[in-house]
Amino acid sequence: MEQKHDILALDDIKLLVNAFYNKVADDVLLAPIFNERLHDHWSQHLAKMYTFWQTVLLEEYTYNGRPFPPHARLPIDATHFDAWLSLFSETVDNLFIGPKADETKWRAGKMAEMFQHKLAYIKNNPLNIL
């Protein structure tokens, strides 16, 4: 078995993203949400996630987008975020160890928190447009 190391390069991010979304695709709660939205566009989503995490973690600015709007109208709540974050953290812990791995989990938690606040705002202010 290969010894764990920290997240240091794009190949590490690809490993993380691929392993994570393999788990998502098998998850009874999350898979229907992703499948409904992505249909047969999983490869495009994965490519976008590579660039997103490459930008966030490695400070290699390859992502150009707004991560929240695609999630704004999804039928998701705290239960979905908890499942997403649990699978994500589990995947990081299974594959990596080190400060960047810890930062990755922290950033994912902060993103989930921010998205939930934004979704609550939209729910309470339905006339606002993104």
Image (cartoon, rainbow, N blue to C red):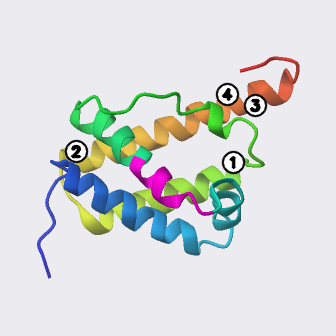
- Which of the two labelled residues, at mark 2 and mark 3, occupies the earlier sequence position? 2
Q: Which mark is residue 56?
A: none
- The image position of residue 34, as x and y in percent, is 64, 58
Q: Are marks 2 and 4 in contact (CB under 8 Å)?
A: no
Give the amino acid at mark 3.
Ala
- Which of the two labelled residues, at mark 2 and mark 4, occupies the earlier sequence position? 2
Residue drawn at x 38%, y 67% as measured from the top left: 19
Give the amino acid at mark 2.
Lys
Under tag 1, what secondary structure?
A: helix
Q: Is residue 83 one of those drawn in magenta? A: no
Number of marks in picture: 4
Residue drawn at x 14%, y 82% as measured from the top left: 1
Horizontally, is 117 left or right of 111 in the view? right
Q: In the rendered view of the protein, which quadrant contains the C terminus?
A: top right
Give the distance between the C-alpha atoms of the residues marked 4 and 1, in whole angstroms: 12 Å
Q: Which mark is residue 78?
A: 1
Give the distance between the C-alpha atoms of the residues marked 3 and 1, in whole angstroms: 10 Å
Task: Answer above or below: position of 1 versus 97.
Answer: below
Residue carrying label 3: 120
Q: Are marks 3 and 4 in contact (CB under 8 Å)?
A: yes
Give the amino acid at mark 4.
Lys
- Which span is picked out in magenta? 40-47
Residue carrying label 4: 118
Residue carrying label 2: 100
